[in-house]
Amino acid sequence: MKKVFLLLLMSVFSHVIHAEYAIIDDIVYNLNVENLTAIVLNFQNAGSDVAIPAEVSYRGDQYIVRSISRYDFDYNSIDSYNDTYHTQQMATSVWGDNWISDAIVERTMKKNQKREEEESYFQYDYNYTRAAINTLQLPNTIKYIYSGSFDGMTRLRALIIPASVDKLPDGENTIFNQSMPRLEHVIVMGLPTFSMSESSVVTFTSMDNEGNFNYIEKLKQKIGIHYCPNLKTFQVPEFKAKQSILDTYTKANQLLKKATVQWNNDLSRSPYNNGAKIATPVLKAEVCLDAELIVNAYKQAIQYIKNRGNSFAYQNAIAYTIDSLENELKKHPYYNGVRLNSNIPKLNTIEMDSAYVADTYISFAKQLGNQYRELAGWQMEQDLKISNPKKYIDAYQQLHPDKKHVIDSIRNEYRCQSQLIQSQIAVSVLDGQSITQEPCRKTQWNQYGDLFDNQEEFERSYNANTNNSFNAQIGVRQNAKYKLTLFKQYASENIKQIKLKSMRKKPNEQTQHIILYLDEFKQTYYYVQAIEYLLSQYPKITAEYEKNKNYFTSQIDFFEAYTSDNYGSILKNNKNK
């Protein structure tokens, strides 16, 4: 039966890769022949006190003990063997002489026997071997402790995890997976890291933005202290030694937050604050293990806050200066929307102390002041002359009231032009330039002179009215002139039917039309022309006028008397006078 089982075991070992298993001083090792490291797997004939060495010698090579692991029979980690004797020796060396027993052989040879039952049996012997260990001394070369590495050591009373251990089991695993009823003391000499999940690695330096730290509690969870009901002491000397430095780190973060709040409060009171705030810097967790690093990082962070604060204050001061000067420009009569050139010089972020910022501000403020004086002095005036002559002339009159009559005269002479042209001409006159444009007075006399009795009447009309009222008068006169043409045409066509003698006493239709025309013309220059035309059409009446004109003040006076109902009485009275 034993031969059959051994043959079966050989077939299993034929599918594996490089590894060496050896028992050295009653400790079972997995030896990595490539990098010369060893993993502690199990113990054979272990006493109550076990000391794992830092190095072991095997076949002439020295192996450094790097980790301790709960042994899990992994066929893929054992070298191939080609003889029964070697296989038997390996099995005996790993599990002890009791492992190859009649019970195991019989169980193995049974058909349909599940492999899990075999492993369960192996586990029993494996745990039984470890149960005798009371104290366990680990070497300072071990880097990693696997999950469940101390399972089965139910009598273990004290455990010291050396400072060389820099990592504990991944995921939710712990180094204690079983109850350790007699464990009383655990001392962790170093500050190992461990993964609480796939996405977060917890270290001594892991903490939130407020500097809160929960490393010890997480370390207890990772070791599996809840499996140790009688634990009396749990010590992490290195953590205790670093705690004062950690307090300094936490305090530094608190001071940074306070400084940031103070700066932001000061900046918020500025009416020119654009809402930008200084972000609170947080010291990187990596510096909290070294007091000197904390101090240097704190100084840099404080400088960052000051730099940001000085930068924002600088921007607010510049904005205030620009706004103040531009408000003054807006009050100037020549203001036309011009802005100061606010190409603000950037600050050197390396040298952003208060004195440097103040010097930079003063230098730029002087530039802004020079810009303001230049604009207010002559540039805005020149720009406004070109961009908006009308506004310029209005502003000029405001600044030079003694020149108002000059401007008014220019506008009057060129009032037939648009306001823009009027203003452009005024600008040219004030600048002493020659004017090629003909005044409106002359052009309008040439165009509308025939609507007036004479030039004197035109001049009176032009001077007495604004451009709009003068144009309206021209319109009235043009309309009257057109009606005079119609009047003459009607009179010539109906001259025989028109009766001027006592014309208002029972007039016929043709005479009534003439009366309506004359009444409409009466208040205009064309009234005289209408009367002159009628008299020219009636020689007898013209002769009457020539005969008695000395008794009347004018041709109109004669015509009105002649066409009235009592011409004879009026003539007699005038002669008597």
Image (cartoon, rainbow, N blue to C red):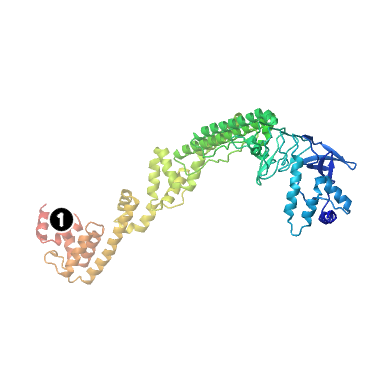
**Residue at the location (74% across, 47% down)?**
123
Type of the residue with mark 1: Tyr
| Residue 94 seen by the camera | no
Crowding near the residue tagged with mark 1, few <14, some 14–19, many ≥20 C-alpha atoms within 10 Å:
some
Residue on which the image places disc 1: 551
- Residue 28 appears in which quarter of the rendering? top right
Residue 105 screen position, x and y as percent? 80, 53
- Residue 139 appears in which quarter of the rendering? top right
Q: Is residue 278 left or right of residue 471?
A: right
**Residue at the location (18% across, 54% down)?**
553
Residue 140 screen position, x and y as percent? 78, 35
| Residue 46 seen by the camera | yes
Q: Is residue 19 left or right of residue 148?
A: right
The residue nearer to you, when weighing 388 against 223, is 223
**Residue at the location (15% across, 62% down)?**
563
The residue nearer to you, when weighing 39 against 345, is 39
The residue nearer to you, when weighing 61 against 4, is 4
How many discs mark residues in the rendered view? 1
Q: Is residue 478 above or below residue 245?
A: below
Residue 63 screen position, x and y as percent? 84, 41
